[in-house]
Image: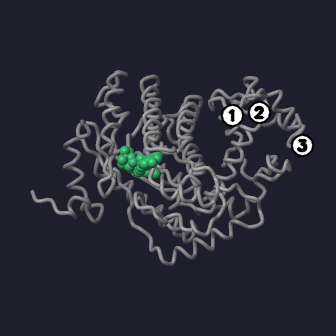
Amino acid sequence: MKMTFYGQFVAGEDQEAIKPLLRRNQAFGVGAVLDYSVEEDLGDGRSRTSAAEKEMGGAEKREERFRAHQGFGDHRGGVTGAHTYFYADEAKCDQHMETFLHCIDASSGSSDDGFSAIKLTALARPQFLVRFSEVLMKWRRFFHQMATEQGQAGRAVLDTKLELEKLQEALANLGIASKAESQQWFTGEKLGTSSTVDLLDWNSLFDSRTKLSKPLLIPNRKTGQLEPLLSRFSEEEELQMKRVLQRMDVLAKRAMEKGVRLMVDAEQSYFQPAISHLTVETQRRFNKSRPIIYNTYQCYLKEAYDNVTGDVELSRREGWHFGTKLVRGAYMEQERERAAQMGYEDPINPTYEKTNEMYHRCLDYVLEEIKRSRKASVMVASHNEDTVKFTLRRMMELGIHPSDKKVCFGQLLGMCDQITFPLALP
Ligand SMILES: Cc1cc2nc3c(=O)[nH]c(=O)nc-3n(C[C@H](O)[C@H](O)[C@H](O)COP(=O)(O)OP(=O)(O)OC[C@H]3O[C@@H](n4cnc5c(N)ncnc54)[C@H](O)[C@@H]3O)c2cc1C
């Protein structure tokens, strides 16, 4: 059969037209990831996004990485390796959600155990994701600040445990919360059962569904002044949070009904804390008996291993299935340029080799978890031959069978095709 350029890269124009190809691939053990690939018009978008980004700056003192910068007002700038969206309004987000629902339906109709991919910048106002990310990072940084004060600087993230007694004293001395108040913080199901608080306990104080509007003051390390962490969350932002969670719920419910796994793509690092936080909240609700929601981890990030190990540990503690797609990361040039121009630390590993090491370290951790608990699943989303070989070798060493569906390989073919084990053999 003669293969044309169009035939190579386009599976079909609509839900019906792609079915024969998907069926043929399925016969060879190749599944599909349906990824909505319509690009928005750039021209009009640039100016409007820039204006909206300027609006975020305001008088408030912002963390450099999460500050608006006119030159990067359009987060799509220079990105060729991933689909990007421009926020117009909430109605447009609803429209994107409808399209994602069609993709889920199409995935379920055309393959067993299908995948569908979504992007949160299509479902939420990017400015909101940046702001929420900043809040989450401040919250995490405050934990590390407390850890340094308790003489625990430089420990691995899950080995850092604050002594509850000392923490409560520090919070009282800083005027953040009296001992009686902070006692309330640590009385949840999982908190306060030991005399220590780790980063996961600390993060769980921050539940977007219930506690977002709670005003909280944290000290600014530079000025020593107490600053509100959340007080600038306006009513509109609260609503934006509610809406994005609702959209994710609608998509997750449909995916569950249709037996489709939903992958949440990773995007720029200044959106990523919020994207990951919202995804983990959805995993907590929908991955109780099997992995419906897959979170994506970008191994070019210096913090990737901490993120993967932290979330695996959270899934163990809370008893849900850890679904993950591991990628190296698609936004390197843009990330580096933005960090250099705005004067904050480059979030990307210094070399390609370091990214490779990070990828294999994260992957190894997840494969060990599959072996240990059978409650983790991974898509190895990479075209790198060494990574595919590494995965196969480690699977063999760990006794994970080659046809085990807990591990699959993902590659991009114009549309995003998931290649399961048989065809991925090197
Ligand atoms: C199925 C699928 C889904 C994907 N989903 C996402 C997603 O949700 N989010 C996302 O960001 N990307 C996503 N990607 C893209 C992915 O992150 C990579 O950009 C792409 O796959 C190339 O990496 P590789 O492992 O295939 O190949 P390789 O050629 O081995 O790796 C190239 C990658 O290495 C890293 N790198 C290169 N040079 C350096 C350097 N000097 N220093 C540090 N790191 C370096 C960069 O991440 C670069 O993209 C996806 C890819 C696939 C196949």
Residue at the image position 39 percent from the left and 66 percent from the top: 38
Q: Nearer the viewer, residue 280 or 67?
A: 67
Q: Residues within 10 Å of mark 3 (few under 14, many from 20)?
A: few
Q: Quadrant of residue 169?
A: top right
| Residue at x 29%, y 46% (from the top left corner) | 31
* The C terminus, quarter of image: top left
Residue type, label 1: Asp
Q: On the image, numbered disc 1 is attached to which residue?
A: 201
- Residue of label 3: 175
Amino acid at the residue labelled 3: Gly
Residue at 44%, 26% (x, y): give it.
368
Q: Position of residue 346 (x, y in %)?
A: 57, 50
Q: Secondary structure at mark 1?
A: helix
368 left or right of 209 in image: left
Circle number at residue 143: none
| In front: label 2 or label 3 | 3
